[in-house]
Each structure stands twice: as C-alpha cells, then as structure tokens.
Image (cartoon, grey):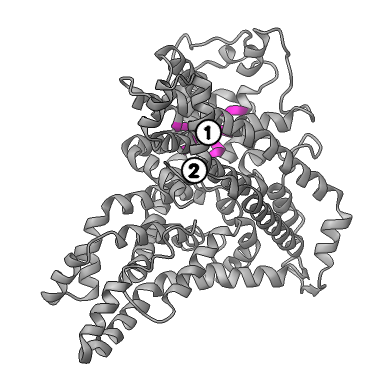
Amino acid sequence: MGVGYGALILLAVLALTPFLWTISTSLKNIDEVFVYPPQWLPHHFKWANYTTLWNELPLGRWIWNSSYIVVLAVAGKVVLASTAAFAFARLRFPGRDLIFYAFLSALMIPWEVTLIPGFVLMRQLGWIDTHYALIVPSMGDVFGVFLLRQSFMSIPRELEDAARIDGASHFMVYRKVILPLSIPALAVVAVLGFMSVWNSFIWPLIMLNTTSKYTLPVGLQLLNSQHGTDWTVLMAGDVISLIPVVFVYLAAQKYFVEGITLTGLKG
Amino acid sequence: MTDGVHDAPGSNPSRARARGRGARKSRWLRRDTIAGYAFVAPSLIHFLIFTVYLMASSLVISTWVWDLLTPHHERGLYNYRTLLFHDPIFRTAFKNTLLLALYTIPTGMALGLLLAMAVNTKLRGIGVFRTAYFLPVVVPVVATAIIFRWLYNPDFGLVNWVFAQFGVGPHDWLGNPSLALPALAAMSVWQGLGWTMTFFLVGLQAIPRHLYEAAEVDGAGRWMRFRHITWPLLTPITFFILVTSTIGSLQGAFDQVYVMTQGGPGYSTYTNSFYLYTQAFRYFHYGYAAAYAWVVFLVIALATGLQFRFLARRVNYDFG
C-alpha cells in the first residue's frame, strides 16, 4: 500500500496552504491583498503589519497570560492526576474502586452541562475576570488519572518493595520510584493538557472582561471583531498566535501523537 | 473504555502479601488507607466541587427561571417544555448540529482512512509528511477559523479562486444561508483529518503483515485485501472514531461558529452550543441554558447507547 511522493506532497499542500497563505497575506501591502486572481507572494515584506499590531494590541501580554496559565494549569493537572493515579494503582483503601469509577463516569459529561453552574460558582467566588477561574477548574484531569493509573500499574512491584525495605514512605515511593519511571506517560498528560488549556475558548471568553487579562484565543477573537476585514493585520495576529503552539508541537511532537493514540487505546 | 478497569490494580499480589504478614497486616492496611485518601484527596476534592457539585447545581438551575440578578423562580420542567415544544430556534440549532455531524463524520472518516493508508509506508521522510498532516489538529480553532474567513472571502478568497479553475462560482460561502453550514463543515473536516488519520494509522500498523502476504499468495487483489483483511480488522478503531466524533459533533461546534458566522446568516449556522451560549450570556436565561445542556447530554447518551447496541457487535476484536 502507500503512494508516491507526488501524492504525499499534494496532500501536504492541502494541509499547509491555509497556513502559508496566512503568512503570505500577513506580509503584504493592503493593495496586494485586494487583487484577483490572488497574488501568491508579497513584492516587499511589509513587517510594519506586525509592528502596527504589536503596538495597538497587548499581544505580548496575551501570550504571557496564556503561557503562565497553561503552565500552572498543566502543573496542577500532572500533580493531581499522578497522586490520584498512584493511590488507585498502588494503595488499597476502602472505596477506592468506587471513587475510580465515579471519576471515569465523568468522561461522558459534555462541557455544556457544567458551563452555567461553573459560571455561577465563579461569580460566587469572586473569580470572574481573574485568572483563577481559568487555572483552578482546569486542574482536574480524569482522563489523565486513567492514563497514569494504567502506566503506574505496569511498573514491577519489586522496585517498590526494594524501596520500602529501605524504609521509604509512600510519598518517597511515589516521588522517587513511580514518577521517574513514568516520564513518557506524564509527558502525554502534560501535552494533552497543554492542548486543551491553550486552545480553550468559550470558558475564558465568558470569564474575562478586561482586555489586558485576555488569553491568546480570546484576544485573537477581539482582533477578529475589531479588524474583521483588515486582512493583513488580522493574518499577522494569527501568525503570532500560531508560533507558540506550533513550536511546542514540533518540540514535543512524539507525545502529541502518542497522546492521541493513547486516547484511542482506551476504546 | 473499560478495558483494563477490571484487572484490579496490582492488588492481588499485595493482598496475598498482606495476608502473609499476619500480625503486621492491620497496621499496614491502616497506613495504606490513610495514605490512599491523602493521595486521592486533591483530585477527589476537585472532582466533588467541579464535577459532582456543578452537576447537581446544573440540575437545580435547569428548573429555574433566572437571570442571575433578580431572585429565581422555581418552575419545575417549564424550561424543558419550552425548549422541546415551543422553541423553533432550538429545532433549527438541533437540526444544524445533526447536519454538521452528517457532513463531517462520514467524510472525515473516509478521507482519514485514505490518508492513513497513504502514509502507512516506509518511504524516507514519511515522518515529515505525517507531521504536516497532523499540524492542523493542534492549533486553536479560533486561529484556523479566522484563516478560513479569509479563504472563504467572496471577492478575494483562495477557495473561490480554486473553484473558478473548474468554472464554478464565485460564491459567498459564509454569507449564503445554504452554503454557510457546509463551509463550516469543510473546515472542520480539514482540521480534524490528522486526528482521524493518526487513529487509523495505529490500526493499520497493528494488522499482521503475514495476513496480506498469505492473501497475495492466494491471488487476492488490492480491493479483496482491503475488503477482507484491512476493513474487518480496523472495525474497533472505526467504531471508536465513530463514537467519539458523534459525541463531539452533538455537543455542537462553538468556536468556529462564534468567530466565522455568529450563527448567521439568519439562523443557518446556529448549533446547540452556540444557541445555548446566546441564551445564557446574551439573553441571561441561565435556567433555560442549563436545561438545554441536559437535553444535549441525554441526546448524546442516547446516541452513544444506540451505537453500542447496534454496532458494537459488528466490531471484530479477533486479530487472528
């Protein structure tokens, strides 16, 4: 099976053209945008589109907001999911399986169901228009618990027993034996968490009011609504917003694909 | 989804060990119990607040008529009745959501399978191509939605230019009520293809080589090999993709609708999630939106149940 390079390249063109076209448009002068048939490349790279945008909107701020929110939320996900997974995989206590099944059943709940009460709760906590509202609720990761539990269970008991004979506490076993042996699985949880937090739109959209507190997707939508037909600037904003996520994807690509694959293996 | 849940987590050896320890058993068990709760506590507290409490709260709010600012009125099933029997926009949004599912799921699965078969090769540099095909999956929908607004531009958009090469168009893709929904669907297919491809690729690579070799020896052609080896052995993956994409589709696309069409023109691209959002955050009908969410949940549960009931037994789990 399989096809030759010709077909593969054609398919890559289909997958990537929207991005390449975005980059090209972002560097054009406006009179090169409104032409038909389309002009493939700009005559001169007009970097001013980027500087205009950067000066007009707090893009740097949005990138910073998105970045630190994603770091804290993902750190929370990894800590919460790995501690719970350790308990489910390695410890015996009454109600353990019941709690685990309850966690699992949460995977079926569509996000719409918790949207309204979540908004009400954030309002009661005074968290509207704060980043707490974006970080704290997204620290839970039931699917991460499931993935890590599977991974922890595959670690041989003998390693843990050896540590216990040396007097290691449960926490030491978790920290010094289990975690170091599960780096790939932890990376998958981190990468899936990154994708869901970084790309999340509706929740930050309803939580945030102040422009300087926006995350990148919400900021990008502001740009979209204010500069709806200012295509060069709009595409420049799009390019800037794509750089971080594409960079992370290329750096951690293995775990993205592995993560997606593991999502499938639960089926 | 339940695979592996039943093999209790390494508890059998430890149970045997604990029995063997006799006198020290109870002390160990207590230590385990305390530690177990301590380790589960952070996740459990989070779960109790952000899942259990919110679910219960959602159910209660769904029986209220409430704008959040004035006191609520307890109205029982009023919101559900209005939604199901007296709200034509709900029907439109629901129909659009189903249509989107119909447009995207079969197309996405067929193209995803073809793409997976194309990249299931040992050609040099195939990894680069897989990376390229998967890229759209990881970027925010908001970003691609803005890109597609530009691609669909009626006067200068690339899409119209491509169609013009075949003598079709030009069309105002997002401005025409009968084209806007298919246009959104096409973008979703483009963005989701890498995801489907990756799953099918995993499935294809799990098929033992020797089956194809044996079939070839028996003189089976390409189509015969696909029909009698590839397709039956892919059914678990196909079923998984079908179930998860149905769940995703029935929730209803939000980001791209919000960015590209705001539900328009008219109500032609209202989806479940977008209409639910407008009810809550534009008209301040919080109770109504909560009820809406439960209806969506029930429909998803029903659809998933039906798929398991009628399709699961046609799935082939035997990898000969």
The residue where tag 1 is placed is B231
Quick check: A39 left or right of B123? right
Type of amino acid at the residue the image marks with label 1: Trp
Check chain identity for marks 1 and 2: say if they share one: no
Measured in 3D between alpha carbons, the distance from the residue under mark 1 to the one under mark 2, in whole angstroms, is: 42 Å
Counting from the top left corner in percent of width and height, residue A133 is at: 51, 61
Is residue B271 visible in the rendered structure shown here? yes
The residue where tag 2 is placed is A216
Q: Residue at x 72, y 11 (%)?
A: B168
Number of numbered discs on residues: 2
Kindly give the residue lying farthest to the right in the view shown. B86
Please name the predominant secondary structure of the magenta segment in the image.
Answer: helix
Type of amino acid at the residue the image marks with label 2: Leu
Q: Answer with the quarter of the image where residue B11 lies.
A: bottom left
Instruction: Please report, as a chain letter, where disc 2 is located.
Output: A
Counting from the top left corner in percent of width and height, residue B171 is at: 74, 18
Quick check: A32 left or right of A73? right
Is residue B120 visible in the rendered structure shown here? no
Quick check: B58 left or right of A22? right
Confirm whether the magenta stretch covers residue A27: no
Instruction: Please report, as a chain letter, where disc 1 is located.
Output: B
